[in-house]
Amino acid sequence: MTDRVETLIIGGGIIGHSISYYLNKSGVSTVVVEKSSSGSKATRAAAGMLGVHTENKQASVFHKLCETSRNLYKELSKELRNLTSIDIGLSEYGMIEISVDSEHERELAAKKEEFPDLDWITAEEMNHRYPYIKKTGGALFMKEDGHVEPANTCEAFKRAALFYGGRLIENNTVLGIEKVNEGYQVQLETGTLIAETVVVSSGADSGRWFEATGLENPIVPTKGECFSLFPARQYFKETLFFRNFYLVPKLDGRYVIGATSIPRDRSTTTTGGGLARLMNDVFAVLPGLADEPFQACWSGIRPGSVDDLPIIGEHPNLSGLYFATGHYRNGILLAPVTGQMIRDFIVENEVPYPEKEMLSPGRLATHERRVTL
Ligand SMILES: Cc1cc2nc3c(=O)[nH]c(=O)nc-3n(C[C@H](O)[C@H](O)[C@H](O)COP(=O)(O)OP(=O)(O)OC[C@H]3O[C@@H](n4cnc5c(N)ncnc54)[C@H](O)[C@@H]3O)c2cc1C
């Protein structure tokens, strides 16, 4: 007999496991199907910044969504630790966006006007506080924008979902979905399941599920490379954000530095050229770090989208089929609010989010093709 499930989630990255956590906590049981191991793709590659203000130049509906999600992390950090004993590594030392020339300084000053709660640090203060940063101009201090440890956060969501009754199938790929009377018949490598609802959260591999359900593929896979140092001493605790790179001091002492950005590149290698460009940029501004021990380098594929916004909501023509993907550079930041939105779509039907239309898969349906299911 075919196994029946309430909600089947395709992909066990941070987005899939956040959704699974919020659904199971609300009494809707899920099965997450992950083709390799949980959190091993874009999630593991991320620096984990909760960059509400580095990702937004203006106050907007999207900015509000980012802020809501960042704020959820405070409680989540405690809640997930209580349920799983995992520390998600929430850093609350803030971020500093540093100007590199006068034009950049004007841009940041305009941002300060837009977000009056942010603090301005003059060039003089910057040079005094951070003497090892060469040639700095004025900077914006975003005291609320910290970071988390992405792999730990994904693992904590996963375990908390299992605690509330969720199921997980790893090392098994979803090969196809077909609309049937009771919902969806889902074909795995090892058999079939019937699910009342299906959520596509398969990161940079999500495009095929749009195509298979009659929509244009909106996913733009974008490769990113990073490296980390393990400095002998702590230079600063705040995340430093420059135009070409960022530097994230992790709570365990590592400095994560990223990232290159190569649209439509799905290769998984970390290239010498990519790292060299990144290192040249970093060491030109922070020469002292060049003497610190190298720790690791890696790459990952961000799930970008054609309009740079995530795609969160129900398929325009197929009820019970949801997308939660296209989070591009902000999947870690937006994981909590994405989980809550999909929970509300499935549990409540009526969702009070003003972002609903802006993020809906239907906005991408202008070139709709015939539904092939
Ligand atoms: C270098 C880099 C730095 C980044 N830094 C940040 C940052 O500082 N802050 C931030 O917010 N975001 C950051 N991001 C972006 C963030 O990593 C992503 O937006 C986020 O991880 C997306 O999560 P996801 O769960 O959608 O995708 P993934 O983590 O890629 O998970 C998708 C999962 O789906 C699985 N899958 C795919 N197809 C199938 C199938 N058919 N069947 C079963 N399973 C399947 C995959 O194996 C994968 O595990 C960064 C990304 C990169 C690459």
Image (cartoon, helix red, strand yellow):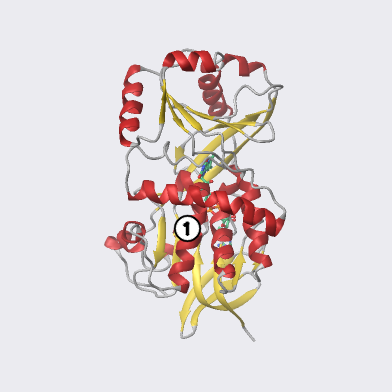
Residue type of the residue flagged with mark 1: Thr
Seen at 47% across and 36% down, the residue is 261
Name the image quarter holding residue 10.
bottom right
Observer able to see residue 284: no
Position in image of residue 326 (x %, y %): 44, 53
Q: Quadrant of the N terminus?
A: bottom right
Q: Which residue is mark 1?
A: 338
Residue drawn 59% across and 63% down? 21
Label 1 Cα crowd, 10 Å radius (few <14 / some 14-19 / many 20+): many
**Cβ at disc 1 under 8 Å from ligand 1:** no
**Which of the 4 image quarters holds residue 52?**
top left
Q: Is residue 340 above or below residue 1?
A: above
Residue 77 location in percent, x, y?
Answer: 61, 50
Vertical arrangement, residue 55 with respect to residue 246, above or below: below
User: Looking at the image, how many numbered discs can be counted on the residues?
Assistant: 1
Is residue 25 something that shows in the picture? yes
Between residue 262 and residue 147, name the one nearer to us.
147
The percent position of residue 183, horizontal first and vertical second, equals: 48, 80
